[in-house]
Amino acid sequence: MKHHLSPKSEVCKILLSSPTRLQGNYSQDDLLIEPIHSIQNSRFDRLNTEILLGRYHYMLVFKVPLENKNNIIIPNHSYVGDYISTALSTLYGKRFDNHGIIESSGLFWMPNYEELITFSPHYYYPCYSNFTRKDIGINLDLRECHSIVDFTLNSKNEKLFRYFFNAAKFYLSSIKSIDSDLDKAYLDLITCGEILSNFYDYQKEELYDPDLRQLMERLVDYHVPDKDLSLIKNRLYQVKRRFVLTLSKLINEPFFDKTESRREDAKFTKENFEKSIIAAYDLRSRYVHTGFQLKDWIEIYAESEYNLSEVQIPGLIPNVDDKDLKNKIIRVPTYVGLERVMRFALLRFLHTNGVYIHSDLD
């Protein structure tokens, strides 16, 4: 016979954590997200230097349908924690971890703490700092997450839901991998952008750059049959062009006004943005096809709390003989820069598809 203090079958509790402290709580109908009281309230050592030894914990509580008591399969609702932690990470631009269920189906469960001891990134990375992000400045308060949580739990737009979360999970995977595998972290951001790019339908002509358009025009002048032209066009998948077009479409004016970079000469501008994104995709292709190491270049100039550059600092020439590679390295975004692009793109993707996030995304 169950004690009246035993776990309730219709209630599920999941433990979340973040290196960032959020105020307030989210409470709506049958769902609650609330900070857990902890004696570890400080992230500063005796020299007043910010450290990452402390984590802030949050309880996600929600009601679940009562299951048939004769069902021998115990339902696992931990996936809800995955969706919520991904949504919160994207909204606030901070890392959130799902440590699993601690109470569900009338049973107590053990949370997973493995991830708590497997990271030690630099505290000044914007996605790990204890400060609000510069752009899309969502206050670090759980009361700010209503719109994205409502979308997560109640969206009727299956396509929008699928594309957003498939892309956003790579964003969260990326910020979890910064310290352990920077190459993977960078590649995950590119994958995030690629997924978003496939949401949109582009006319074939939109995907052609000026050189390709001129080539097509010459083929028409040479009276190449239409069926041959169609065959050529259908083979031109233009994956990179779709990637660049989508990010250029999702980045708006306020993105360039509120930068993470502390150097004026190493931030994104309307003039350098497209070339920088192209360089990132090209270096990713080199990594995939040749094993080229990205980490040797993408953070050379950004690993400093006094810098946080988004693009490479002008005047610093990479020591490589390959001229084409050298030009790409000069233009490539740092990890800090590309992470900001993808978070902004993810949130504007939602905002422009009917999920209100912030006025800067109009």
Image: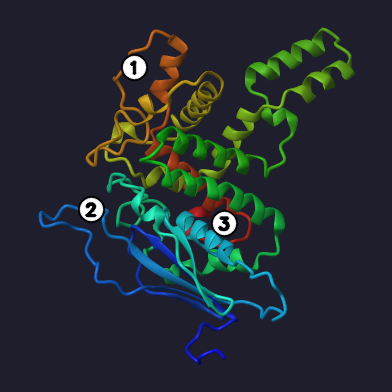
347 versus 355 height, above or below: above
Please tell me which residue is depicted at 25% across the width and 67% down the height of the picture.
40
* Helix, strand or loop for disc 2: loop
Left or right of 315: which side holds 348? right
Hey, which quadrant is residue 66 in on the image? bottom right
The mark closer to the camera, 3 or 2, is: 2
Using the rendered image of the protein, determine whether residue 141 is visible from the camera's viewpoint: no
Question: Where is mark 1, residue-wise?
Answer: 318
Task: Residue at 38%, 21% (x, y): give it.
Answer: 330
Q: Residue 85 placed where, x, y %?
A: 49, 60
Amino acid found under the numbered disc labelled 1 = Pro
**Which residue matches tag 3?**
351
Q: Choose between 19 and 246: the one closer to the eye.
A: 19
Q: Does residue 55 appear to the left or right of 197 in the view shown?
A: left
Q: Which of marks 3 and 1 precedes in the sequence?
A: 1
Q: Nearer the viewer, residue 240 or 79?
A: 79
Disc 2 marks which amino acid? Ile
**Label 1: few (<14), some (14–19) or many (≥20) C-alpha neighbours in 10 Å:** few
Which numbered disc flags the more N-terminal residue, 2 or 1? 2
Element type at mark 1: loop
